[in-house]
Image (cartoon, rainbow, N blue to C red):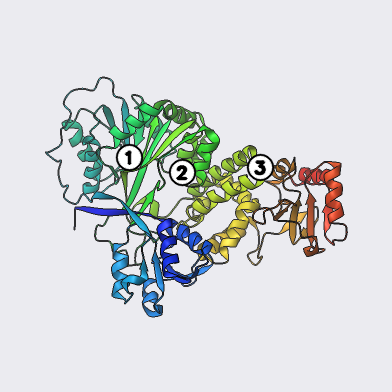
Amino acid sequence: MKRNVIYDIYEPDLEKLCQAVSMLNIDKCIVYGIGGNGSYFSKCLNAMGTKIQFYVDVKAGSNTYFKGKPVISPENLRKQYRGEYIVVSPNIHASIVEFLKEIGVAKDRIILPFYKRESVPVDYGYHLKEASKDIDYEKSVIISPLVTITSIIYNTEEYLLRRSFESILRQTYRNFVYVIIINGATDRSYEIAKEYEQMDVRVKVIRLVSNYVWTDLKLIKTIRNNLYGKYWCQLDGDDYYSEGFLEYAVKVGEKNKTDMVAVRTMAIAADSEFDLMKKDISFDGKDKFWFYHSDPLCHAFSQNHIMEEFAIGRLSGTWWGKLWDMKVTEQYFDDLIDMNDEIRGCYFRLDTAMTYKMLTLCERVYFSDEVYHFQSFSPGRTSYSKAPTEWLMSLWYVYKDLKLRFFRWYDYDTAMRYTKSFLKIFTKWMFARRGLLDDIELSPYKNMIKHNLQEIYNDDILMSFIIDKSKTDEIYRLFYKRICEICGGTMNQEKIGLHAGNEKYNRIIGYGAKGKNAGIVIGMLMDTVIFPTELWDRNGDDKLIKKPDPNSLSKDDLVLILPSSALAVSSIKKDLEYCKAKVVEYEELRQWILECR
């Protein structure tokens, strides 16, 4: 096993892709990879008029689609390749290029639209069987530590645990206290932690006799009662920080007076020999590497901009890889302690909800493209094991709160854009977990969970998103089926039943979506079963809001007139004078909203 490996990190270069397409006159191609870069490259290729024939990925199933095109496995590419250009999309792609050459793809047919950003050394930690002797362990008591680092440990392999502990003790910035909470571990974690505590005065080991979930007050209060200094960060027992993390993050935090500093995370397979070309892996088909925070460094000021960055994925939902201001940290844990047990237990089991809650307390954050945090993933890690239903509840809580904020802050189409961006990023985590919904009856929060599942079923934005995905993705289809079974719906419907009053309609159209009060009305419709499936306006852009097409209306359609002014209503009614659809004006619509609520 290799213990230390240096990897060249590449970033996508759309300009380079455009130049290659133009220079080689590429009218059709294959794209290798269906991750974030694959999506970026697809948009660029489509904009240039280049037809994508299909995608290739190790995660390909028997009926997998991406951007409306089929996804095939590398082995099937071996059989189907006929000399096409292949655009390679993963950042780390050496093994992919080797594979393509092996199956006969000519070098000049492989398009690599990247620029080299840096070389990153990865420590796999296999050599760590005892405490390292080359660390400058602190012997003098730290009177006023500036930073608290917390690790909650439960049954972690020794070499990974030592790598994690030693990554903190090797930090070039030394003014910190390292709190290690042994959370009911039954292996040697406690003895290993005590070993480092005896060698370095900055280490404080606390042993809990039971394994507590993140929402248990015992664990929460243990963390809260051991916070010191001005900043706080967290590290999982099988992850690690590079030695310059604290020095960099503290410097940025002090200089910019931020509530949070996020660095870039490089996620790595714990097995250094993991073969990217193999599909026989048991942790959701991740590639060997992927990155959080792939965009250039940026500041985000004020709540709305912070939430925008969170919704589009530039600010990840992970707890780790971030240095938090201590005032934000203390407020978060105090809020959790004061929270109703059922709400805390149901909604805050997953770190996405924890991070989101802390971000709601921030007014200024900074996120960097510097790689300082390394996350290991393996079949045994909780991220890839069976998921409790409370994880879904955590993400549902975040979605509901974000949606309300966006529709309060913005006009309809902007709010929808950010809401759907969040769904595109997080729905795989919300609905694709193994074991999700299997443990509802065993949960102490089962009544609250069932109530939330009914809300999910009735949420038109979310359910239309799921149903649309269900047409090409078995994961969504299975989740949709389970939700229908739990909530009393039927699986054979192609789209959500749309009801208004006692009648059912094929389409519900909101007309006048850019009118003065349209956003308010749409917000009122948000949690009802008469939420529009289409929006029309004479100034529509034919994307989110379409231009009116009265001739397409049938007797099975319903048109909601959103504006309230007499002039606007009169103008819209004139457009609809000869249509067969049922038309509802503002006042009647308000009454329907009250009935639906």
Left or right: 545 with respect to 205?
right
- In the image, what residue type sits under mark 1? Leu
Labels 3 & 2 near each other (Cβ < 8 A): no
- Is residue 590 among what the camera can see? yes
Q: Residue furthest left?
A: 133
Residue hosting label 3? 411
User: Which residue is tagged 1?
Assistant: 235
Secondary structure found at label 3:
loop
Q: Do the residues labelled 1 and 3 touch (CB within 8 Å)?
A: no
Q: Which mark is residue 519?
A: none
- The residue that label 2 is drawn on is 352
Tag 2: amino acid: Thr
Q: What element carries label 2?
A: helix
Kind of residue at badge 3: Asp
- Point out the frontmost of discs 1 and 3: 3
Identified at 77% across, 46% down, the residue is 562
Lower sequence index among marks 2 and 1: 1
Q: Give how far apart the Cα atoms at labels 1 and 3 are.
A: 39 Å
Looking at the image, tell me whether mark 3 or mark 2 is earlier in sequence order.
Answer: 2
Where is residue 191? Give x, y as percent: 20, 39
